[in-house]
Amino acid sequence: MRTVSPDSSSRMTGLRRWGSAGLGLLSAVAAVLFVLAPAEQHVTTYEWPSAPGPQSTALPLFPYQPERFDANFDCPQPRDGLILASTPPAGQTGEKLGGPELTVRAESGSAVVKVGSTEVAKRPLGGACAWRVHVDAGGTTVEVDGQPVAHHPQRPIVSGLFTESPNPSLHVSVVADTRFDTDASVLKIFFGILAALSLLALLVLTIRWDARFTRRARVLPRRWWRPRPADLVVTVVLFGWSVIGPLTVDDGYIVSMLKSRADAGFVGNYFRWFNAPEAPFGWFYEVYRLLAGISAHEVWLRLPSVVIGLVCWILLDRLLLPRLIARPTAWTRWVCAAVFLLWYLPLNIGVRPEPWIVLGSLVVFALVERALATNAVAPLAIGIVVAGATVAVTPTGVAAFLPFVAAIGGVLRLLRRRRDFTWPPLIGLLFATGGSALLFMFYDQTLSTVLEATRIRTQIGPSYEWQKEITRYTTLLDPTVVEGALNRRVPILLMLFCLVALAALLLYRRTPGLAAAANRRLAICSALYLVALMFTPTKWTHHFGALAGFGVLLITVVVHTIARGALRAVWARSVTVAVLAAVVALALSAPDRWWYISGLGVLWTRDNPSVAGFSVANLVLAGGVLLAVAGGLVGTWRHAGDRPADQRAVRWLPSAGSLLVLVTVATVLLEVGSMVQAVAKRWDTYTIGRANLASLTGRTCGLEDWLGAEPDRGAGVLRPVSAEPARLAGFLPNAGFPSAPPAPYGSDAAHPVWGSYQVPSVSGALTSPWYALPPGASAPDAPPLVVARAGSGTTSLRIEYARADGSPAGAQDVDAGTDGAWEDARLDPAQAPGAERVRVVANYDGVGNWVAVSAPRLPVLVPTTRLVPIDEPVAVDWPNAFVLPCRRPASLADGKVQQVKYRFAPGADRELAGMAYDPASGGPYAPLVQLANSREVPTYLRGDKLLQEPVTVFRLDYTVTERGIRTTRTTRPVSSLAGGPPVG
């Protein structure tokens, strides 16, 4: 055996020490240089006109302002007219973008240049002269014959190049603002590889050195890989939920970001913030982008969250429960599985980042606990790398650093014990592992673009200060919104209860069956996360999804220690049962509401859960209070008898742990069972689960597989059975309404509308002719019967049905109060058995009250995939993008938004998509709204006649399209520190 002399050992120690310090410093410096290294920016230049005789053209820049703009022209003839404008002239289509536009106009023998409403320059026309309007980061400069004559500090917005007096000498060059469209340079790639390899070598060296000084312990228990019954249940439920489960709030938002990445060159926010990237957060989007490149179907894109969930379950069951609980039983593992599903199903199956935070925080917690248990430094170093990568996912990833904070005392004692690990290698290790986060944060952007993206998001918002954190909890307790639904309340409120309970038990040292120190750190991590949430810029309750790991452990350890006798006394059990009953009642005092159309057919999505007409929340509260009072009375009686030994729990009084398990299991069964029931109940029409099951058998377009569009409202208007005219008293034919009805209503006798608006009559009545219902109108797959109506005030509207012989077959009342706007009422003729005819009866009474109504129609439908081919890009709104997997959003490549012909809006909830059309929010579709007229194309869901359209299609008709433009694409190196004018 080879021996090592003391001098040789000393030399090896010194080499190891300074080698580690050098590798750490090299990795940290390389990571910083990675951030500061230059990048390659893709630049797009538009030249107009590309041929003599300029014609007005659309050029919807996005962001709206160019990086550089040059317009050159000779002095025109002294006649009035528009020489050049960067937005549509007054009176043309659309809404203003809200920013200053450039106009150059000949007026009374002079050329006038304006930016917005500000006159920048005015010079006489005539003679030989050369004009130049130049825009750059400094603003707008006007030159005549090469000499600056005026300057304005603002840059104009550009949605097109318009002229009414074509000037043959006119030439415009526009460089779009593509600052975020960059690729890593060779130097940046080199520094990134150097930093990663140096860090890897340092970690290997640290692991090998640890082996000489640490206690050996298995990372995972023996036979950890052998499946257990709980594993099977968790796996089946997670995969099943990925098929039948609801949408998370941002699934559609994120999938559109992923789809647009191929065009834009980076993962931007797409729907707002001028498509600024998420950097320094969001590297995990690149994983989803690779999957989206294969398929955009829901089940496929949910796969990462399912896999992450299974990994988290293995960490919980195999690593962390044995660390927190002394010899966890099979029963404890089943409890953990149920609590895990309670947290993970409603909050983490989707494409939001919370599953990654759960995984990162659990991995770091396990690594810190292993370091404390084995006296090793390497797990701490790896934990810092994992925590940095987790923070680079999203700001709530700060949860991954909390185990270090909670264990700070133990970590410092560990480092003091490890005298072999001196300051130079320790500092090098800290710098290298901490600097690794920079590789995740700046992999696709420069320092200047990250700072600008952060500024944009902060300035536009939403960005709440920490004092507004109460908003998150008031939203959680608001039963009228998805954020306050039962499925979110139950896990969060149970966790808060268990956090307080565990803290009290640890304080009084009544935690049988638990490792006190490790559980103390768990409680601190959970509490600190609630504090850290205060400093996040938004206050949504889905951020609690990142707590799934800590929350599951908290509830499980509390149930376990109570089962081991933590609360033996009658008084203790009575009080905890009463408090828990109040918490559960509060949690159940809300509907089981799900996002967007996920709740179709699901039980209790509108009302609170009830049994035999009694609120479940009230039953739980009453039962808990009665049990607590009964237990208290028994405890008092026994205490009065001076028998302290009998203060042990009464057998019939349930423990808080048992109630926790009961509520957990019942909630999971409610969520899963109601989703299964919804799929079965609506098998012949659309649900999330039905569409996903269909996608597994070849149907590929999600919601659109059941969606039909009505291109022509007039085609379905029913024909009267006789020439008998409508009976009108206080109504006018094809008149009597303040705004025009949907075309072609009111245009001729074949498409009649009757109205009473401003008719000089205090009251009135309308009875339309009888209209023939075509055969099959009552079939389940037939479209609904539709009546367009508008009205205000005291009115009534009834649809009457009859058989062929004129005998009544039923009637349906329709709400005519629409605040004056035209709306379609949808009815099902099957509710009037035997109906073969239909007519409209309307009344109003009182001054100022009015109603207008159309003849009924049975829409003539075509599939939306036929109306709009699936390979045609569209303006798709974020709430419904995830359920439209075949749809590709309008491209934001080359610094402009693509002029698409159709918009897919989220039906009745279309105001949710407003930010995409709002210039103040940096919405990409705002230029399209300025350039186009919008016309609604109604849609219908096959098999659900009464559902108001889940998706509304709008046709965009442009007065001018992009034409006569030459596009040039180049690349240029840009410094990481190079700034630019503020976007927006």
Image (cartoon, rainbow, N blue to C red):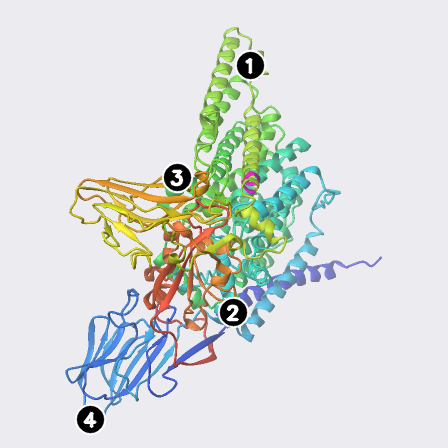
Q: Earlier in the sequence, mark 3 or mark 2?
A: 2
User: Which residue is outermost to the bottom?
Assistant: 128
Q: Which residue is mark 2?
A: 33
Q: Is residue 637 magenta?
A: no
Considering only order in the chain, which callout, 1 or 2, is on the residue closer to the N terminus?
A: 2
Q: Main secondary structure of the magenta part?
A: helix
Q: Are marks 3 and 4 in contact (CB under 8 Å)?
A: no
**Residue 29, horizontal then vertical, whole percent:** 54, 67
Dividing the image into 4 quarters, which one contains the C terminus? bottom left
Q: Which residues are magenta?
A: 675-679
Which image quarter holds the N terminus? bottom right
Q: Earlier in the sequence, mark 3 or mark 4?
A: 4
- Element at label 2: helix
Kindly report the distance in space between the C-alpha atoms of the residues bearing marks 4 and 2: 57 Å
Q: Identify the amino acid type marked 3.
A: Thr
Give the Cα separation between the discs numbered 3 and 4. 70 Å
- Which residue is identified by label 4? 127
Secondary element type, mark 1: helix
Q: Secondary structure at mark 3?
A: loop
Residue carrying label 3: 480
Mark 2 burial class by Cα count in 10 Å: few <14, some 14-19, many 20+:
some
Asked if one can make out residue 459 in the rendered structure from this viewpoint, the answer is yes
Mark 3–mark 2 Cα distance, whole angstroms, equals 50 Å
Work out how far the residue at label 1 is from the one at label 4, CA to CA, in angstroms: 109 Å
Do the residues bearing badges 3 and 1 touch, measured as CB atoms within 8 Å?
no
